[in-house]
Image (spheres, rainbow, N blue to C red):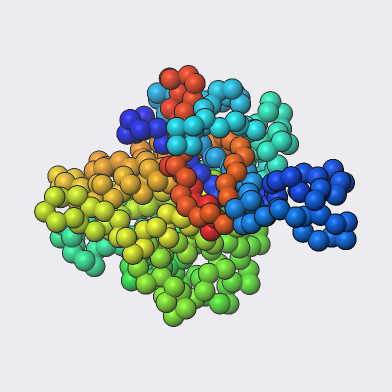
Amino acid sequence: MPPTPTPRLRAFRLPPVFLGLLLLGTAAAATAQGEAPSGGDSGGGEPAGLDVGFEDLVEVSEVFVDILATDEDGNVVRGLGIDDFVVEEDGNPVTLTGVSYYSTRYGDPAAAPAEAAEPAAAAGDGEVPSSRYFVMFFHDQTRYGYFGANRLMRQQLRAGQDARRWIAEALLPSDWIAVVSYDVKLKVHQDFTQDREVLQRAIERATTGEDPSDFNPSRREAVGRGRELNVLSRLPEGKALRRESRNVYQGLQRVAEASGFLVGRKVMMLYTVGFGVRRGNTGTSLPDPRYYSDLETVLNDHNVAVYPIDLTPSGFPPIQEDFLTRIAEDTGGYYDENFIGFFDPLERIARENYGYYLLTYRTERPAGEVGYQRLEVRARNPEIEVRARTGYRFGL
C-alpha cells in the first residue's frame, strides 16, 4: 500500500495548449456576423469611439490534467467518467470537457510506443492502450561521504540489485525503461528499451559508478532500431553534456526535456539521499531557489512524475525528507523514507501506474498574462484517492 499523502488533495498539470486569441467587443462581434460596426466608415477605418486595446484580447487554453485514481490498497480504479471528478482552480470549480482512461496493462507491444491514441479514440471497453515509461535515475552521492562512503555505497548497490530483480520479474510487455546516473554530470547508461539483459547491465554500471561505455558516437546510429527508442540518445555528449548538467537539478531537466518526445505519463524513479538546501538549524530542507522553479516547470511541462527512493541507510534520519516530499508532490509522485528493501517500492510505484486518467477543460485569461495556476482535483467518491500535480504555469 502506498504511503498516505498529505491531507491536501494534490492536482496535476500539463501545460495549457494554446488554442487562439479571441477579440472581444462590439466591433469583433459585428465583424464575425458579417456586419460593419456602426459609427465608422465602410472604408475599413477604425470605428469612432471604439478603443480596442491589449486588455481586450483573451487567451483561450485547453488544460490537460493527468491523474492517478487508486483505492485504499493502491490499486488503480477503472471505469470512472466525467461526473466522477471535481477540478477546482483557486477554489472555483471548472467544467470538464473530457475524461479518458489510458491503460498500460495491455496493448500491442510492437506498436510504436512513442505514439498515443487520441483521447476520444478509446479502444474496446473505453480504455486507450498505452505504454509505461520509467526512468531509473541514480544520484550517486557516495563521493560526498554522507553516512560514511562505504555504508552509502552498500545502499546504492543493494538498490541496484533489487532494481535488476524487478526488471527480471515484473516488467510488462508495454514497459519501456531508461537508466541514467549523476555524479558531477549526467550519464546516460541506457536509452528506453524493453531488453531485460541490457537494462540489468546498465543498472550495474550506474550503481557502481562506471561510465556508460555503450553510449558512444559509433553506437548511436543503431539506437532506435529493434527494441530501443531514440529518446535520451538525442542528448549531447562529453563536454557539451557536462556543460548542460552542471548540477543534479539541470541533469533532471535534461532527462525530462528529452523524454518529452514520448507521449503520455513518464515516471522518474529518483534514487538519492536528497539535494535540497538545509534551512538554518531547523533540520528542514528546501529546494534550491536558483534551480528548482525551472526544474519543476520542465518536469510538469513534459509530464514526468518523480518518485524519490531514499538511499539513506537504515537507522539514520532522512535529512532531506522535506525536499523529497516537495518534489514528489509538485510532480504527482510520492516519497517514502528509509526503505528496508528496494524491491517493494518499485512494485508499489508500478502498481499505481497501471493506468491513468486524462481530464480536459478550457480556461480563459488575458492574453500575455504569465503566472502559476494552482489546481485541486478530487474524486466525488471519498474512498478513491487522487494523485496529481499541484498546478501549472501559463503564458510562458
The part of the image, by quadrant, that contains residue 329 is top left
Residue 129 vertical placement versus 185 (above, below): above
Going by the image, does 23 lie left or right of 197?
A: right
What is the quadrant of the N terminus in the image? top left
- State the residue at coordinates (86%, 46%): 35
Is residue 165 in sight in this rendering?
no
Residue depicted at x 46% and y 49%? 372
Q: How many marks?
A: 0
Please give the name of the residue rendered at 57% of the width and 68% of the height, measured from the top-left corner. 234
Estimate the x, y position of residue 170 in percent, counting from the top left.
48, 40
User: Is 224 on the left-hand or right-hand side of 207?
Assistant: right
Q: Position of residue 132 (x, y in %)?
A: 55, 44
Q: Is residue 221 something that shows in the picture?
A: yes
Relative depth, front residue between 69 and 108: 69
Q: Nearer the viewer, residue 144 or 333?
A: 333
Residue 332 image position (x, y, % from top left) = 43, 42
For residue 337, above or below residue 227: above
Q: Nearer the viewer, residue 80 or 164?
A: 80
Q: Furthest-left residue in view?
A: 281
Residue 317, horizontal then vertical, whole percent: 16, 46
Is 269 rendered above or below residue 238?
above
Residue 346 relative to residue 151: left or right:
right
Residue at 53% x, 26% y is 85
